[in-house]
Image: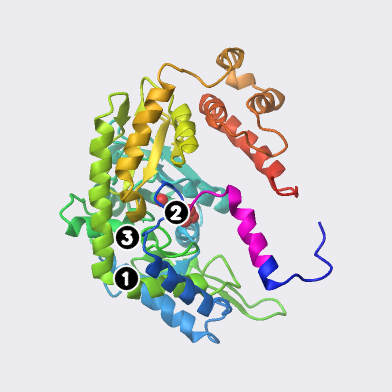
Amino acid sequence: MKIPEQGASRETVLAALEAYRVHDLATHGGRTWAYVYDTGRPDIEEVATAAYSAYLGLNGLDFTVFPSLLQLETEVVSMAASHLGGDEGVVGNFTSGGTESIILAVKAARDRFRATRPEVARPGVVAPVTAHAAFHKAAHYLDVDLVLVDVDPATFKADPAAMAAAVTSATMMLVGSAVSYAHGVIDPIPELGAIALERDLLLHVDGCIGGFLLPYFRRLGAPVTDFDFSVPGVTSISMDLHKYGYAPKGASVVLYRDRELRRHQFFVCADWPGYTMVNSTIQSSKTGGPLAAAWALLNYIGDAGYLELSREILEATRRLVAGLRTIPELRVMGEPECSLVVFTSDSVNVFRLIDEMRALGWYVQPQLGNRGSKENVHLSVDPASGAAVEGLLAAVRECVERVRGMGSALPEELAAAIAGLDPATLGPATAAGLFEAVGIRDGRLPERMAPVNEVMNLLPPAVTTELLTDFVNDVFVYRPPAG
Ligand SMILES: *Cc1c(COP(=O)(O)O)cnc(C)c1O
């Protein structure tokens, strides 16, 4: 494809952009139970959009020439710190998302460890298996070891004794989640903090999802165990504003208990002939839009407004869990402690259930079976979806009926072939053949995802990882838009 020779009109261009969205998931209306965090309030979105546009052209590369961005960032970070029990010493930065916040926290830990313990070649992070995949990514990018420890099989919470047992002289940091994305439960942060203090380790709390909501849930009377800077031993926390702060995507904060640790997060380069580069985060040139939008919403919604939105979520989550528990075929996994609810089934195929939900216009998220956690359906409650709980439950009931007795979504020969495979000798060609057999071709996915999910659920994660890497390599290739 070439750049069009002549420009088109503003109307033509914007209409084309609108038209490209026909196959997208709805971002409003309460039927999308993942990816979007919708308050259902157009006024909130208008404020965010206006603030975003007003700061879109600014460049966060250089805070000395755009002091507004420095001021907004320190205000957002200070509000975040006080929300999470931080004192005056807590510092942090605004980042593009939870993943960047986590990579930066691991990078700060690594560089501090390199400075203080240069004899350790490859420092390690000890984390529960439920730690977000962003920690795998951080370990991969930063060349540190990620040591994964099983969680309690009933509660899906980190097991402090097992984590302590996994600590070695190369360990630099422990990780806990508040809450975990996969199961929506809070790890025992006070116990992890005690281990961190005793063994002289850092402790990062992943509060990407729960950091913003949990303090409100506690004020609303929900049982919330301590997880923030009030817990001795917690040294850093990540918290997303583009989830339950309702900011447009590109908004998160990473916080540190003190400046000594945060110093290791930065990257400065004065050794080239260009401008002196002083980067607080991974991005260098970056728009001020997300920061301005996040700041605007904190000020527009305010503490009382967020408390009200949190009340809607808490009540909706309780109705959702109670409703799911009345469906005999389904089993809620763990005790949801925030806004995330996960259920599985021992009698119906959850991947088929998800496809049927999609056909009825509901998007719910599949999670594969992994390390003691059975394949399941993941639901994120937001104020907009909260108003749709009864509709969702009715759809789930109907879909359970539709898929009852249907069993596997894989053709019998294929299921048998996979069952007969020896993962140890499974070659790449065989594995790729499995993907093709379930309809993945030329970088395009089939309409029905159950067979694809089932294949991935059966294959060893390392094989699935290879296949998906090839798949994504096929996806990002120019093709004309689907009709
Ligand atoms: C969403 C999430 C992340 C990753 O955040 P992104 O904003 O998607 O980069 C990390 N941890 C938890 C617990 C999350 O929910």
- State yes or no: discs 1 and 3 in contact (Cβ < 8 Å): no
Question: In this rendering, is residue 116 above or below 368?
Answer: below
Q: Is residue 55 left or right of residue 467?
A: left
Using the rendered view, name the quadrant where residue 11 is placed.
bottom right
Mark seen at residue 36: 2
Q: Of the two numbered discs 1 and 3 on the same chain, state the one appearing first in sequence.
A: 3
* Crowdedness near tag 1: few (<14), some (14–19) or many (≥20) residues, C-alpha within 10 Å: some
Residue 17 in the magenta stretch? The answer is yes
Near-viewer residue (6 or 122) = 6
Q: Nearer the viewer, mark 2 or mark 3?
A: 2
- The magenta segment is 13-27
Query: Label 2 sits on what residue type?
Result: Val
Element type at mark 1: helix
* Crowdedness near tag 3: few (<14), some (14–19) or many (≥20) residues, C-alpha within 10 Å: many
Rendered residue at 34%/41% (across/down): 391
Residue placed furthest toward the left: 221
Q: Which residue is mark 1?
A: 301
Q: CA distance from mark 1 to mark 3?
A: 13 Å
